[in-house]
Image (spheres, rainbow, N blue to C red):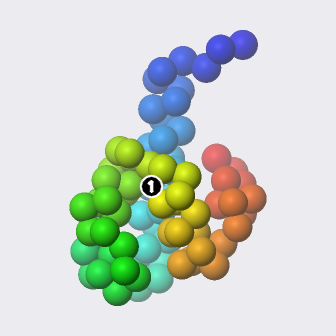
Amino acid sequence: MEISDEQIDFKIEQIAQKIKQLRKDSGYTSYETFAFDKNLNRVQYWRVEKGQNVTIKTLLKILDIHKISLEEFFKGL
């Protein structure tokens, strides 16, 4: 069974929203402040929260900052 582009886009949006929620749960209302404090490229991080250009490397960095494993992150998605 092949996954459709719409299904992929939906999953990417879920990932982006979960990353955004992790930031908010850490007490950061601004993605810019979070990116600056955590030494992440501001524009790159903005793109991640928008579901654009999410690389595995960046995802792993963000999960490491939040001290969450890949398994925990993807649970329920």
Q: Is residue 32 above or below residue 72?
A: below
Quarter assignment of residue 42: bottom left
Which residue lies at the image location 65% right of the left edge and 14% below the top edge? Answer: 2
In the foreground, 65 or 3: 65
**Residue corresponding to mark 1:** 17
Residue found at the far top of this picture: 1
The residue at 48%/78% (across/down) is: 25
Q: Residues within 10 Å of mark 1 (few under 14, many from 20)?
A: some
Q: Position of residue 5 (x, y in %)?
A: 48, 21
| Quadrant of residue 20 within the rendered picture | bottom left
- Indicate the position of residue 18 as horizontal and vertical percent values: 51, 59
For the question of whether residue 8 can be seen, the reply is yes
Decide: is 49 above or below 68: above
Q: Position of residue 71 (x, y in %)?
A: 74, 59
The residue lying toward the viewer, choosing from 63 and 77, is 63
- The residue located at (54%, 18%) in the rendering is 4
Can I make out residue 34 in this image? no
Look at the image and tell me in which quarter the N terminus lies. Answer: top right
Tag count in the figure?
1
At a point 53% along the width and 58% down the height, the residue shown is 57
Left or right of residue 58: residue 45: left
Q: Residue furthest front?
A: 57
Query: Which residue type does callout 1 highlight?
Result: Gln
**Picture coordinates of residue 67, whole percent (x, y):** 63, 78
Name the element at disc 1: helix
